[in-house]
Image: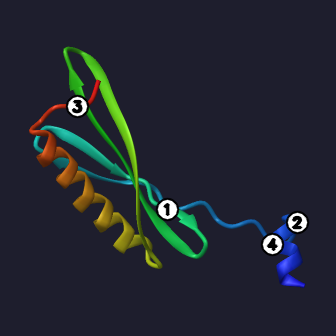
Amino acid sequence: MSFLKKLFGGGKAEAPPQAAKTLDYQGYLVRATPFKENDRYQVCGVISREIDGALEEETFIRADASPLFDDAVEMTFFKARQIIDLRGGGMPK
């Protein structure tokens, strides 16, 4: 019966994920925004910074996932630091 509820959207609604956590890193603001996918939290985040008065943002999603929200947040911060370091401080156009 629970299979049919999931398939057709019955049953109680899933609670939204916890509020995003942030990290300041080398002039960037990273917001960790993991989302629940099949009982695991998918690594997802937003990297932003202000350039010449305009806010530049990039959202990223990775294949990494964790059953624990806090672990997914830490993985998101790790991946964001890698992205920033590999780009040498440049945001994509």
Relative image position of residue 14 (x, y in whole percent): 69, 67
What separation in Å lies between label 3 and label 2 (alpha carbons)? 41 Å
* Residue matched to label 1: 18
What separation in Å lies between label 3 and label 4 (alpha carbons)? 40 Å
Query: As rendered, which of 69 and 81 lies closer to the eye?
Result: 81
Relative image position of residue 45 (x, y in whole percent): 38, 50
Which label is found at residue 6?
Answer: 4
Q: Earlier in the sequence, mark 3 or mark 2?
A: 2
Q: Are marks 2 and 4 in contact (CB under 8 Å)?
A: yes
Q: Earlier in the sequence, mark 3 or mark 4?
A: 4
Q: Are marks 3 and 1 in contact (CB under 8 Å)?
A: no
Q: Residues within 10 Å of mark 1 (few under 14, many from 20)?
A: few
Q: Earlier in the sequence, mark 3 or mark 1?
A: 1
* Residue matched to label 3: 91
Q: Quadrant of the N terminus?
A: bottom right
Outermost residue toward the top in this view = 52
Q: Residues within 10 Å of mark 2 (few under 14, many from 20)?
A: few
What separation in Å lies between label 3 and label 1 (alpha carbons)? 27 Å
Q: Earlier in the sequence, mark 1 or mark 4?
A: 4
